Amino acid sequence: MTPYILVTGGTGFIGSLTTVSLLEAGHNVLILDNLSNSSPSVLDAIEKITGKRPDFIQGDIRDAALLADLFSRYSIQAVMHFAGLKAVGESVQFPLRYYDNNVHGSVQLLQAMQAANVRTFIFSSSATVYGDPKFLPLTEDHPLSTTNPYGHSKLMVEEILQNLYKSEDGWRIACLRYFNPVGAHPSGLIGEAPQGIPNNLMPYVAQVAVGERAQLSVFGDDYDTPDGTGVRDYIHVMDLAEGHLAALNYCLENDSELLAVNLGTGTGYSVLDMISAFERSSQRRIAYQIAPRRPGDIASCWADTSFARKKLGWTASSGIQKMCDDAWRWQCHAAATKNG
């Protein structure tokens, strides 16, 4: 049988662009996605970019019968797991939804892998597992804690993976703790397309720039940062996709191992830095207002990326301006498509 990489959440923002990288590297890809925050039209864009169309099954990772059938019909070589809810503020409002999808769903997926004797797992984790930073930049051995249910759900899955790795030989696991993915495919054909009001900064900024929203709310200007707004390590989504490919290659080439790896740039930018960069890309003014801090947010967060460079041979290459240029190209394409 033809070997496949199973990509859960593969029509989402990061999953779809990682699928592009996988196809371009010669892998066969099977996507499992419930389309709760994405569109099947992404499959057309993937095919347009790569000349290949991934196999696609619409379904949920919490559906044990579906997973069992999928693993019996396909020869799965490895699993990349992106099918998680990801908004900090929403997780504070709806914690049970996050634990059900992110934790219970991951357990269901791992049980299906275990039954099918598939032992290579690339997990979409997050820098939120570091909680409120005790020191910066964040290294992989920074103490782990969380400030919101989203981060806690990611940390719980990491702990489950540690228990699984210790209990059973043969697992090759990479927990990729990434920072703030932004940007889009350089073609403008795939980018972040949240349904409803965006929870993340860049898609909201982009929608303000294109005229879909009146202004941006900047949550807090009284943090202990250079300009008072939150500082984050923004990473181009295509760099992130290549980081997943590097992690997959490492796991497939090595024996049993459990890795936790930061994927970031090592540079922090404030919300106002990001707004200024996007204004340069779009040649438009971004209207914003200062709003109260959000529960669960922290002041600053950026990565020490030396372990990823040493272990995976991976380094992010794109700066903040390219991130904004590509996101603006995508936003213009999305607006044109929407308006017919």
Image (cartoon, grey):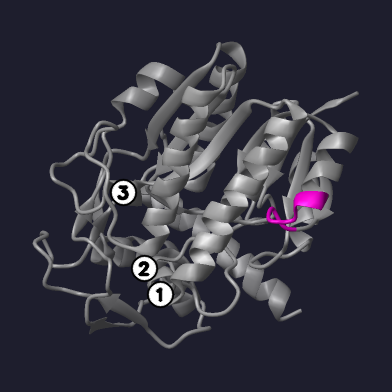
Which residue corresponds to the image point at 13% horizontal and 42% vertical from the top-left?
Answer: 135
| Residue 303 disc label | none
CA–CA distance between discs 1 and 2?
5 Å
Does the segment drawn in magenta span residue 61? Answer: yes
Instruction: Tell me, yes or no, if residue 48 can be seen here.
Output: no
Task: Name the residue type under label 2.
Answer: Glu
In magenta, the rendered stretch is 60-65
**Which residue, given by chain and number where applicable, does mark 3 sit on?**
233
Task: Name the residue type under label 3.
Answer: Asp
Does the segment drawn in magenta span residue 193? Answer: no
Task: Name the residue type under label 1.
Answer: Arg
Which residue corresponds to the image point at 59% horizontal and 26% vertical from the top-left?
Answer: 248
* Circle 3 crowding by C-alpha within 10 Å: few under 14, some 14–19, many from 20: many
Dividing the picture into quarters, in which one does residue 159 lie? top left
User: In the rendered image of this protein, does residue 171 appear above or below residue 328?
Assistant: above
* Circle 2 crowding by C-alpha within 10 Å: few under 14, some 14–19, many from 20: some
Which secondary structure, mark 3? loop
Instruction: Tell me, yes or no, if residue 226 can be seen here.
Output: yes
**Which residue, given by chain and number where applicable, does mark 2 sit on?**
279
- Look at the numbered discs 1 and 2 and tell me whether their residues touch, using CB distance below 8 Å: yes
Q: Give the position of the N terminus as an image quadrant.
A: top right
Magenta span: chief secondary structure: loop
CA–CA distance between discs 1 and 3?
24 Å
* Circle 1 crowding by C-alpha within 10 Å: few under 14, some 14–19, many from 20: some
Which residue corresponds to the image point at 42% horizontal and 61% vertical from the top-left?
Answer: 281
